[in-house]
Amino acid sequence: MRTLLAIIAGLLVSATAAAHHGAPGYDFSKAVTLEGNIVEVQWKNPHVYFTIENKGANGMARRLDIEAASLSTVLAFGLRREMLAPGTHVKVLGFGRLRDPEGANYKGATVTLPNGSTYYIENTPQGVKPVREAIAATALSGKWLPASSASFGEYMQAEFRARGAVQGGNAETGAKAQDATDAAGRANFSCANLAKNISVPFATSALYVLRTVEIGDRSVVMSIDADGFVLKREVHLPPAQHPANAAPTQLGHSIGHWEGKTLVIDTVAFSPGRGQSVRKHMIERLGLTDDRHHVHYEVTVEDPDNYPMPFHYEMLWDHRPDLAMSGVACDDQIARKFLSLK
């Protein structure tokens, strides 16, 4: 848990925390245990919310909102909507609001069901995975999920170091982060703007969500189930080349080639945005491991405007044919929900 708190504290000072917008408003230095009956579930993106009812210190009934991760992340942890049926008695490990620590809104970490089973409902560094039989892949094409939910924290730590950023975080830092987010205004805080803040390799490395790979004769399509919108990247295969005057885009222009059984992707022409400039150049390598249960993914980013030296990161993706895209679009009302909960 100390590792979890340290990682989340570091996230409070990152631009990415604004994209995963619930984090700045909570005090991750004080974990609390909540218990009650579920009365409502909002099975939506970019965050799942459920409400429990219990009795407060004054003996009166009270309702508490629990914020979880995105729907695609919650599904990856193995939780299903029917497990949170109204009337179900649950225990929640969570964190209260910075501005109102004993209020009615909490960030959830785990939920324990009546049968004693516990599910993570937010990214953790422990590498949580549902108990399942490993299934070998026949090719790089398929459904994949980071082998560890720790990838979010690990990636952010690596990127912070590459940027030369100073890590740290406390209640004051978190309050300032929330003030900055609130200052942006509800009118500008939307699913469309959340989508604009997601870049690669953040999406391919940090997000603990389903990603698919489809290999064709002329291109490879990579899709990522990200907070209620599916990011799609098309990688053009030989004889394709980067156009001389490629129009910059959020995800850049990608070409690929095979080195044996490893797919090598070269991406340029990025538009300026969250942590990237027009000078960004990215090389990715994807290949099946010997046991065919994983993809070994590695990425190197050169961007002189953001990294003093090239940034390199490696990770494993699990073969997860049991998962499917959440199919639930990002909801603006849910995206702005935390702004109204002080």
Image (cartoon, rainbow, N blue to C red):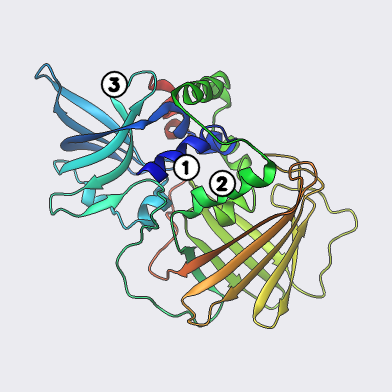
Image coordinates of residue 40 in percent, x first then y, are: 24, 36
Image coordinates of residue 101 in percent, x first then y, are: 32, 22
Quarter containing the C terminus: top left
**Which of 104/300 is in front?**
300
- The residue at 57%/56% (across/down) is 205
Label 3 crowd bin: few (<14), some (14–19), many (20+), radius 10 Å: some
* Mark 1 and mark 2 residues within 8 Å of each other at the beta carbon: yes
Q: Is residue 5 left or right of residue 30?
A: right
- The residue at 52%/82% (across/down) is 290
Name the residue carrying label 3. Answer: 103
Label 2 crowd bin: few (<14), some (14–19), many (20+), radius 10 Å: some
- The residue at 58%/26% (across/down) is 188
Name the residue carrying label 2. Answer: 157
Q: Which of labels 2 and 3 is toward the front?
A: 2
**Which of 124/275 is in front?**
124
Can residue 331 be spotted in the picture? Answer: no
Q: Is residue 5 left or right of residue 38?
A: right
Name the residue carrying label 1. Answer: 7
Is label 2 in a helix, a strand or a loop? helix
Q: Is residue 280 above or below residue 192?
A: below
Can residue 290 be spotted in the picture? Answer: yes
Q: Is residue 12 above or below residue 77?
A: above
- The residue at 47%/42% (across/down) is 7
Label 1 crowd bin: few (<14), some (14–19), many (20+), radius 10 Å: many
